[in-house]
Amino acid sequence: QTLTRPLTSLPPADLETFLETQRMAYEDLKARGLKLDLTRGKPSVEQLDLSNELLSLPRGHKDGSGTDVRNYGGLEGLPELRAIFADLLWVEPAQVVAGGNASLTMMHDCLVQLLLHGGPDSPRPWSQEESVKFVCPVPGYDRHFTMLASYGIEMLTVPMHDDGPDVAAVRELVRDPAVKGMWIVPTYANPSGSVVTQEIASALASMDTAAPDFRIFWDNAYAFHHLTEDEAKSADIITLASAAGHPNRPLMFASTSKITFAGAGVAFLAASEANVKWYLSHQKFASIGPDKVNQLRHVQFFGSAAGVREHMARHREILAPKFAAVDAALSSALDGREVATWSKPSGGYFVNLDVLDGTATRVVELAREAGIVLTPAGASFPHGVDPRDRNIRLAPSFPTLDEVETAMAGVATCVLLAAAEKLAA
Ligand code: PLP
């Protein structure tokens, strides 16, 4: 039956009929005059409301040790907040810095310090090397790639699988001494939703690298952002690397941007004590201390690591139905057609949609003309170029559930129309 057969198996006449039907469906979609945006992974207003108590905190202006948070000082952050996140990230409080409002800034600071000064184990600053290259699992986070591009760092891609990056490919690349680092979003990756297994983390922690100061930028932005009760545990990269004799290899980042207020939370760096000392030794020239008032209100709001976990369960109640709606809409329109696959993440903020090769740009264009704004095709690849033009990142967190349902049914229509156009061409 034409209705459920793979598009590639339709005889030309049936494909033409199918194309006509999709054109009509698309015209109907356009006529609805939608105005929907699924571009960025932002928390919804309902999620932000979960943290409104922060707006009337802190109570008082002293932390547990009597420090007056209204004044300068304490570059490494408030001890109580560092202890809560050390517990969550499985490290010692001395291995955690509680910083400013953005983990991306901490990643950028680390990168720039490595370029200008080198790390504790660098023979020379990275900028004095002939070239600097990074391993980039793809699809990945666009801002990681644009950060490297802004410093002229060459990006070498490896596939990101369900269990983490392709380790054999990584091992091969790190034989080049110019390869100084790699990105990885280990838990519910942006955008694939993959979770790096303990085995893969262990391989990355212990592999031989030609660069003695190789760094894994372990961006654990979604460490606690579960969508099901089956909560993935992040691999303990810092212990693994230390046990393998490479204690300074990982630089772990996290933040409360998608726990409390996006861009108005607290960011964290976790690493070996040598790395923490190194980071602060340069950071002291840039800051007299972080916003401890904000840190104190976060301490009071969460109370403990358990408080953070309970808070995340409330986010899950809001987010899980939206992710279920994405899957339901795509399944109902695309199952059996064999023109798209998509992730069914158990955490994080994204659904990764792979459409028929060579049609992602067209799908995004069709969607935009129908009033549904999607992240530009290719955004999850270095320099915005997806060699297969098939990858689209969907971010269902911000719109309402109704809007997600409407938008995804529309996206499915665009996927089918673009595929039929291509196959009929
Ligand atoms: N890292 C990843 C993987 C992200 O997806 C995001 C935001 O989308 C960030 C970092 C930004 O974090 P922050 O707000 O702490 O800078």
Image (tube, grey):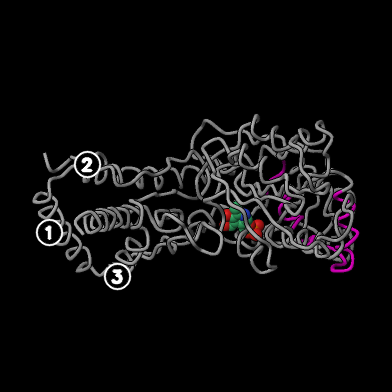
205 with respect to 222 (left or right): right
Q: Is residue 303 magenta?
A: yes
- Residue 177 visible to an observer of this rendering: yes
Instruction: Kindly report which numbered mark, 3 or 2, lies closer to the viewer in this rendering.
Output: 2
Q: Residues within 10 Å of mark 2 (few under 14, many from 20)?
A: some
Q: Which residue is mark 1?
A: 20
Secondary structure, mark 3, is helix
**Residue 168, position as x, y percentages in the image:** 62, 37
Q: Is 321 or 185 nearer to us in this picture?
A: 185
Disc 3 marks a residue whose amino acid type is Glu
Residue 227 on image: x %, y %: 49, 40
| Inter-mark Cα distance, 2 to 1 | 17 Å
The residue closer to the viewer here, 71 or 17, is 17
Sequence-wise first label, 3 or 2: 2
The part of the image, by quadrant, that contains residue 106 is: bottom right
Residue marked by disc 2:
6
Asked if residue 306 is among those painted magenta in the image, a careful observer would answer no
Q: Secondary structure at mark 2?
A: loop
